[in-house]
Amino acid sequence: MLRQPLFECLLSFLCATNTNIPAVQSRVEAIAGAWGEPVAGGGIRAFPTATALRSATENDFRACHLGYRAPFACSTVATICGDPRWQAEVSAAPHDEARAMLMDLSGIGPKAADCILLYALGHLDAFPVDVWIRRILARHYLPELGDGPLSPSLYEMARGFGRDRFGVHAGYAQLYLFGARDLLCKD
């Protein structure tokens, strides 16, 4: 299970809304290339801190291909730089409180918050629901999810099912289900 630094994970999931993995990777690499510190041994740069991004503008983030996400990135950086305790507070908060704090940030919805809880904050009971997990759940557990986009209430139903069914290790179950998606979604 990845235990990514909170700010890096947060901004990476801001870059991930409504897109594919290569586009996310391109955006994250562009941000690191523009503001990150060089890493020993090559032209690779580390992901920058919130402080390093403090002066970045919407246009700067747009230049990194964030598009409509650029104002969300600026707002998130401003929130984190404006309250040096924010990261520690969200890290120490119980699951539901941390999730609410994440979703208070512009551009962070339920799925991104659940991913951040799982991949950065170590909440192994988080159960993010993407299109693949929805398909698996609809096919094998919850046919009422259907095959269209998830409304907020259906997302919460799927998330709640995963957390109830798989308990304190729901995040591991989510990863296994995702890893077996080709088999589990095969006709």
Image: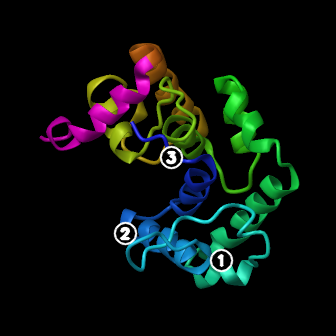
Number of the label disc, if any, that sits on residue 22: 2
Left/right placement of residue 52 relative to residue 81 reads: left
Q: Which residue appears at 87% of the width and 55% of the height?
A: 82
Q: How many marks?
A: 3
Disc 1 to disc 3, how far (Cα)? 21 Å
Type of amino acid under label 3: Gln
Q: Give the range drawn in magenta.
A: 169-187
Q: Label 3: state its secondary structure.
A: loop
Q: Which of marks 2 and 3 is nearer the N terminus?
A: 3
Please tell me whether the stretch drawn in magenta is mainly helix, strand or loop.
helix
Disc 2 to disc 1, how far (Cα)? 17 Å
Q: Name the residue under label 3.
A: 4
Between 1 and 149, the residue placed more toward the observer is: 1
Q: Which residue lies furthest to the front in this view?
A: 40
* Dots 2, 3 in contact, CB < 8 A: no
Residue 59 higher or lower than 149, as above or below = below
